[in-house]
Image (tube, rainbow, N blue to C red):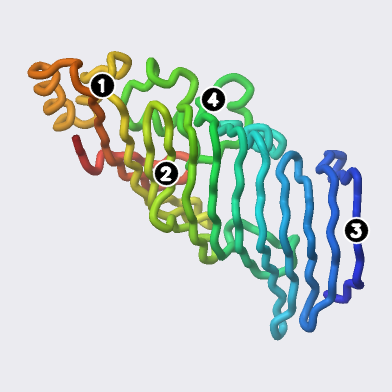
């Protein structure tokens, strides 16, 4: 099974089921208990994958591992190419990965994955969905349209068709398909900041997390809208507004608990802050 000879491979155009994946180059080198696919430079419909991939036998079992970086330009275009809705876009993105799973490289599964993932997305949008995008699959944890509605805040004037961000960064640790944030995943933007921490079980598609939303209070985001989502915050800000008015720069942050089905999570008010 692991008797693969030493090879240097370069393919200008690789197709899978009639779909163009892109150019591939790699080297294969035999090891004591398996094989290493080295100097990876793979194009996967806009996703660039570099680094090393290993496949080895341990007793009667085989396992695989990958150390390297996945990246590209617009993640929205990559999502569409793979059949997902483009509910997040970027100017550039990278994911540094150190992963392992049971079986051959072809047995890769998010529900069985263990390892570390460091994500870094630059300059894009968390977008709402309409039209033909509804027919595509959606990453529930990134479904900003659904989260916005469930937060019970009126974002319409502030973000229009989506929430612009400058950077998304964070570290996720996985163990057999359970993904836990290490510290938090931060979304930094010109109009708001989001901080997500918790865990996702890819096996049963369940989430248990908290989301802190920090928004500037301007004429585009009425105090009444904040009061609906967080009455204590709204009441305090109402008094500040009456006493001081618009002479100060005002921000509000509210924390929500997200749990249940990953694609249709239950989101409830967890904590209120001013």
Asked if the residue under mark 1 is in contact with the one under mark 3, i.e. CB atoms within 8 Å, the reply is: no
Q: Residues within 10 Å of mark 1 (few under 14, many from 20)?
A: some
Q: Earlier in the sequence, mark 2 or mark 4?
A: 4
Using the rendered image of the protein, determine whether residue 227 is visible from the camera's viewpoint.
Answer: yes
In this view, 20 is above or below 40: above
Of 151 and 205, the residue lying toward us? 151
Q: Earlier in the sequence, mark 2 or mark 3?
A: 3
Q: Earlier in the sequence, mark 3 or mark 1?
A: 3
Query: Quadrant where the N terminus lies?
Result: bottom right
Closer to the camera: disc 3 or disc 4?
3
Query: Quadrant where the C terminus lies?
Result: top left
| Residue identifier under label 1 | 225
Asked if the residue under mark 1 is in contact with the one under mark 2, i.e. CB atoms within 8 Å, the reply is: no
Q: Is residue 167 left or right of residue 32?
A: left
Label 2 sits on a secondary structure element that is: strand
- Residue farthest toward the front in the current orientation of the protein: 247
**Alpha carbon separation for disc pair 4 and 1:** 22 Å
In this view, 202 is above or below 191: below
Q: Quadrant of residue 13?
A: top right
| Residue identifier under label 3 | 9
Label 3 sits on a secondary structure element that is: strand
**Alpha carbon separation for disc pair 3 and 4:** 41 Å
In the image, what residue occupies the spot 26% across and 39% down?
Answer: 269
Q: Quadrant of residue 217?
A: top left
Q: Earlier in the sequence, mark 3 or mark 4?
A: 3
Closer to the camera: disc 2 or disc 1?
2
**The label number, if any, that marks residue 129 in the structure image:** 4
User: Where residue 99 appears, x then y in whole percent?
Assistant: 61, 63
| Residue identifier under label 2 | 186
User: Where residue 57 appears, x then y in whole percent?
Assistant: 74, 79
User: Where residue 100 appears, x then y in whole percent?
Assistant: 63, 67
**Alpha carbon separation for disc pair 2 and 4:** 22 Å
């Amino acid at each position: 099974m692991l008797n693969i000879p030493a090879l240097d491979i370069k393919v200008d155009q690789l197709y899978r089921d009639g779909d163009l994946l892109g150019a591939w180059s790699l080297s294969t080198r035999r090891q004591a208990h398996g094989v290493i696919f080295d100097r990876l430079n793979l194009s996967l419909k806009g996703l660039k994958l570099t680094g090393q991939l290993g496949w080895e036998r341990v007793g009667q079992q085989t396992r695989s591992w990958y150390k390297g970086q996945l990246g590209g330009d617009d993640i929205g275009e990559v999502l569409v190419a793979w059949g997902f809705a483009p509910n997040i876009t970027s100017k550039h993105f990278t994911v540094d990965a150190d992963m392992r799973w049971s079986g051959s490289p072809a047995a890769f599964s998010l529900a069985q994955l263990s390892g570390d993932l460091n994500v870094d997305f630059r300059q894009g949008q968390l977008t709402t969905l309409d039209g033909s995008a509804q027919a595509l699959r959606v990453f529930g944890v990134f479904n900003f349209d659904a989260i916005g509605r469930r937060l019970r805040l009126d974002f319409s004037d502030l973000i229009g068709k989506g929430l612009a961000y400058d950077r998304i960064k964070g570290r996720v640790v996985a163990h057999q398909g359970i993904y836990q944030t290490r510290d938090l995943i931060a979304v930094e933007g010109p109009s708001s900041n989001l901080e997500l921490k918790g865990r996702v079980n890819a096996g049963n598609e369940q989430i248990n997390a908290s989301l802190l939303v920090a928004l500037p209070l301007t004429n585009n985001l009425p105090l009444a809208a904040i009061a609906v989502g967080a009455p204590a915050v709204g009441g305090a800000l109402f008094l500040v507004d009456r006493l001081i008015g618009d002479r100060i720069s005002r921000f509000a942050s509210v924390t929500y608990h997200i749990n249940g089905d990953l694609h249709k999570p239950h989101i409830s008010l967890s904590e209120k802050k001013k």
